[in-house]
Image (cartoon, helix red, strand yellow):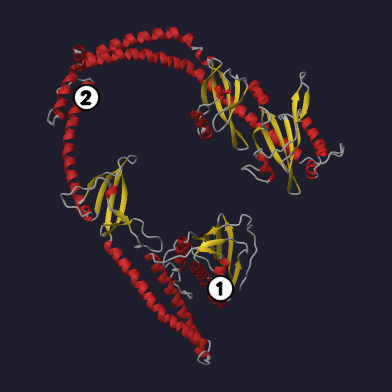
Amino acid sequence: MRLLRELNSQLQYKIIAPFLLLTLLVAFAGSTIAFLFVTGTAQERLNNQLAQTARTTADEIVELEQANLTFLREMVFAGPNTQTGAPAVADAFAENDPEGLEQALEPYFRVSLQRQGIRVDRLIAFNNQGQSVIDWERFFDEIGEPQRTNHELRDINVLWFVPRILSNQNDAVGDKFAGLLDLGDDKTRYIFTVAPVVKEEKIVGGLIIATRLNTLLQDLRDNSSSAIVTLYQADNGQSFASTQIPNAGLTTLNIQPDVVASIRDLELSNEQGIYDTVAVNERDYQFAYAPLRIRSSTVGIISVALASDYVTGPWADSRPPLIILTVFLSITIIGLGIFIARQITRPLQELVSTAQAVSSGNLTERSNVHSQDEVGVLSGAFNNMTDHLLSLYDKVHAEASQRAAIVESIADGVIVCESSGNILLMNKTMRAFLQLANDQAKPNHFNNIPLEPLDDTVLAFGDDRTPDLFQLHDRVVRVVVTPVELDHKTRFGDVYVFQDLTSEVTIDRAKTNFIATISHELRTPLTVIGGSSELLLRGVVGNISDDQRTLLETMRRHTLSMTNILNNVITIARLEAGTLTFDIESIHIYDVLDELLWSIQPAIAAKGLMLDIQIPDNLPKVMADTYQLQNVFHQLLDNARRYTDTGAITISARLQKGHVRVDIVDTGRGIEPDLSDQIFTRFARGPQGINSPERGIGLGLVIAKRLLELQGGRLWLDHTSEQGSTFSFLLICNNADPNYQDKENPIATAA
């Protein structure tokens, strides 16, 4: 132990000892690097060859499937053969003629042996009930002559693709399916392709052609010069077919779960292949895996393998020269280490003494080493660093005091947090917001700040309430957060600024209450005036002259206009206050319109406009509030009427992905591009403003948009041009009819 302490106390020993250890490491590293260098090239060649072979093998399977698919199309669309008397394939299916179907398909099954790139080992024809009517399989006898086996006919609806074919379902590619097939009658598996047989747009049956995997894999192995070709299930990597069965069974070839996950991501990466080493019959093989995709779907995993002896063989030839090189380098490193240690330790001791003095707080201490080598340069740099450190310390101390004073003087509350949320700094304004005395400890975490989201809508302008307003004790504050980044990459934390908006919120609430109160008070006399003028126009109190009728009509029209404006103002006030209620129920859109038309149609007709309603009679009901949905229609139709001088206003509806979409199309003058982004804000109007002949205050679209959102819907400007505009909205559909067809079947057209 004493010797060990002595060695640790002397720098020269600490330098020499690592050099001795480094010698051993160099010997090991040199051998390892040489081994990797020698074997790396061979391994890389092997990997590249395996990756290319795996992909080529997978591509050959895909090409076979494509060739089989082309051949299958010929069979499906085969017409009658006048020479043999065979009927068309579709006709044989439609007429339930098994003999004719055999006569039509037999030439194709026979000729498939001579077609380049096609391999049809099994042909199955099934009718529209899912019953096989032909099930042929080809095999070769002992002298290599092709023979045919007729399998027993059966119900094949259990095959996953048969119901889809018969029900005319499509996948992402089309109405045909392909993949791996296990018929369950033996251990033989196939790669299959299936297509429907259609006659007069009706599916009358289907055809399946399949290739045996065992013979296909043997051919692929022979073509690729691989030792082993294996197929696996795509989801778990379980092997189910291989050209070589290990003594321990096929499970020996199963893919590890982590390798399966890597194979799934292979097409999204830049890797050439996924590799693994597997012991088969006491011999190591290098496997390369690739996904097997048929018709844009991954149906399995394919692998090719070569023996690993190809990689380790070259190492034995390179071992002797590498040992000699390692010994020479070791001796050189030891001698060099001793020499360097003696040159460094003496001036470094001086630097150590100076560094100890500086670290203890004596920033005036300086090193006296003045040699011309790197140690001398280090000594000078150390002295300069100490001078700079002393100057920087004074500057930082002054700036820190200045910044602390600035933060404390900010009128808004300020909190500085780490990225984890721990509070580092809090100014006195923030302490006042939290009602903390000067001697009280600040909260440790930002989540401990008692912030509550504001429960009503304030400081809004036609949209939702301001999202960054919170209740903090008796104050309403806006919280603004800004991330603190040290070098535009590393996030240190966040700065939270709390602005006291209590007065502004109070004023906003008072404004809303004032507007609502005044609007209610004004609406009552206007209602009386409008009703009285309506009675006078109807002659309830006697006949009136034409001049009187003109004055009364003007009075009634302007009273109605003012009443609508007040209703909109009251609705806006109730929306902001959150007091507007909704009774959501299942309703039909046309019923809502039917109750509304009597009030809005006279105004539309007065301008000479047509009102065209195109709503299918089998349109599903929607979930909405009847009164509020009427308000939405009223606002949108009134908006269309105001800005349409000639033509028509069209209301149409259709089903769209679980919602009912309503389009309101006018033939007006359109909306200016610079106003399109502002039409859903309060008081947004066209360039004519208050001088427009159709006067309004720009609340209708705001109200319609907000009412729809509160009922789970959405409103937007779908289209606008000089020929008119289209406003569209969606409402949630209630129990949509799955057989509903989006067709033109209007139940009403009004002028």
Residue 388 in the image: x percent, y percent? 18, 34
Q: Secondary structure at mark 2?
A: helix
Kind of residue at disc 2 = Leu
- Residue 736 numbered mark, or none: none
In the shown orientation, is residue 646 left or right of residue 395? Answer: right
Considering only order in the chain, which callout, 2 or 1, is on the residue closer to the N terminus?
Answer: 2
Residue 551 in the image: x percent, y percent? 48, 87
Q: Secondary structure at mark 1?
A: helix
Q: Which residue is labeled 1 in the image?
A: 597
Q: How far apart in space, not on screen, are marks 1 and 2 (Cα)?
A: 92 Å
Residue in the image at 73% along x and 44% along y: 128
Residue 193 in the image: x percent, y percent? 68, 36
Residue in the image at 29% along x and 11% along y: 334
Residue 403 in the image: x percent, y percent? 20, 47
Q: Is residue 240 above or below residue 501?
A: above
In the shown orientation, is residue 83 left or right of residue 286? Answer: right
CB under 8 Å between discs 1 and 2: no
Q: Is residue 227 above or below residue 173?
A: above
Q: Which residue is labeled 2 in the image?
A: 378
Kind of residue at disc 1 = Leu
State which quadrant residue 722 falls in: bottom right
Residue in the image at 78% along x and 45% along y: 94
For the residue carrying disc 1, how many other residues have a C-alpha within 10 Å: few (<14), some (14-19), or many (20+)? some
**Quadrant in which the C terminus appears:** bottom right
State which quadrant residue 588 falls in: bottom right
Q: Is residue 78 above or below residue 503?
A: above
**Quadrant in which the N terminus appears:** top left
Residue in the image at 50% along x and 18% along y: 41
